[in-house]
Image (cartoon, rainbow, N blue to C red):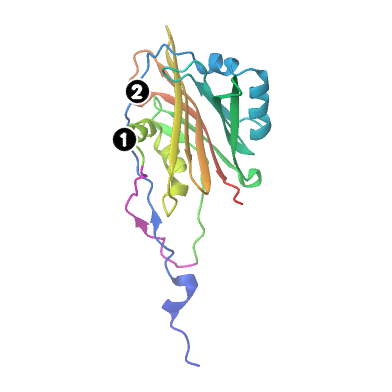
Amino acid sequence: PAPRPADADPARLPAPAEPAAPIHQPGGFPTGDSAPNRSRCWDMLGPRTRERLAEKAGTVLAWWARLDPGEERPTAIAFGPLGLCRATPTTRHGRPVYLVERLRLDAGALVNETFTVDGSARRSRGVARFRRHAPDAPPPPVRPPTTLDLHPQQLGVLGNYPAGVQEFLQRPFLRDDRNVAADYYYEESRDFTGQRLYTVFCLSADRTVTLAAGTRTLPRGRPEERAKWEIECYRVPVLRG
């Protein structure tokens, strides 16, 4: 048989184009809400509901709870290696109870990265990841950014995070995942030294869940772009079937 041309060697062919994660513009964190904070809302769930959330999530890595306008009881979400879990208030046989649901996750495939970004030093630190290429092969091409089908307000909140965190959260959903849902929580505290903001941002779809949880510290008198971020990010596949 005739020799195969060198450019037909799979090791020399360019890899499929990788979609680029879009970096969104910051939309701000609206603050000043007088609603109970997440700790108070968590206490309102009751011990049995909190225990069920912990059992279904496994080790709770992040949690948040809120009291929606017009509601008397909060909704809570807990994330852990075993699941993304939600406790929703409902009524059963005339009694107020909580419905606890779980999106089951593959704990053995959970990936965790830590991002520390110090705006005052204008440098960031994260966990570096490298992709192997065949010898002499060109790097894979990068497709134009693909924007997730989310509400503009959700994209604006996502845009507050450092670029590395935005990329981590969006990357698994850029190829062909559909029906991506976003949820987020933020809570502000202030004193004479400045502002501290606790934040959570979660994306979920049929195959993957990504989540970022951490703090943004902004000393008094410093612009927002020079804040310090300390963020834990998680990516975990959804168990199917």
Determine whether 153 is above or below 146 in the image: above
Crowding around mark 1 (Cα neighbors within 10 Å: few <14, some 14 to 19, many 20+) is few
Mark 1–mark 2 Cα distance, whole angstroms, equals 20 Å
State the residue in front, 174 or 74.
Answer: 74
Tell me which residue sits at (45%, 29%) in the image: 184
The kind of residue on which mark 2 rests is Glu
Viewer-nearest of discs 1 and 2: 1
**Is there any visible trace of residue 58 in the rendered image?**
no
Tell me which residue sits at (38%, 46%) in the image: 21
Q: How many marks?
A: 2
Q: Is 136 covered by the magenta stretch?
A: yes
Tell me if label 1 and label 2 are in contact, CB under 8 Å. Answer: no
Q: On the rendered structure, is 53 left or right of 16?
A: right
**Is there any visible trace of residue 60 in the rendered image?**
yes
State the residue in front, 16 or 238.
Answer: 238
State the residue in front, 120 or 9.
Answer: 9
Tell me which residue sits at (52%, 18%) in the image: 73
Tell me which residue sits at (49%, 15%) in the image: 72
Q: Is 112 covered by the magenta stretch?
A: no
Image location (x, y in percent) of residue 43: 59, 15
The kind of residue on which mark 1 rests is Pro
Magenta region: 135-149
Q: Which residue is mark 2?
A: 224
Numbered label attached to residue 152: 1
Q: On the rendered structure, is 96 left or right of 72?
A: right
State the residue in front, 156 or 17.
Answer: 156
Image location (x, y in percent) of residue 150: 36, 40
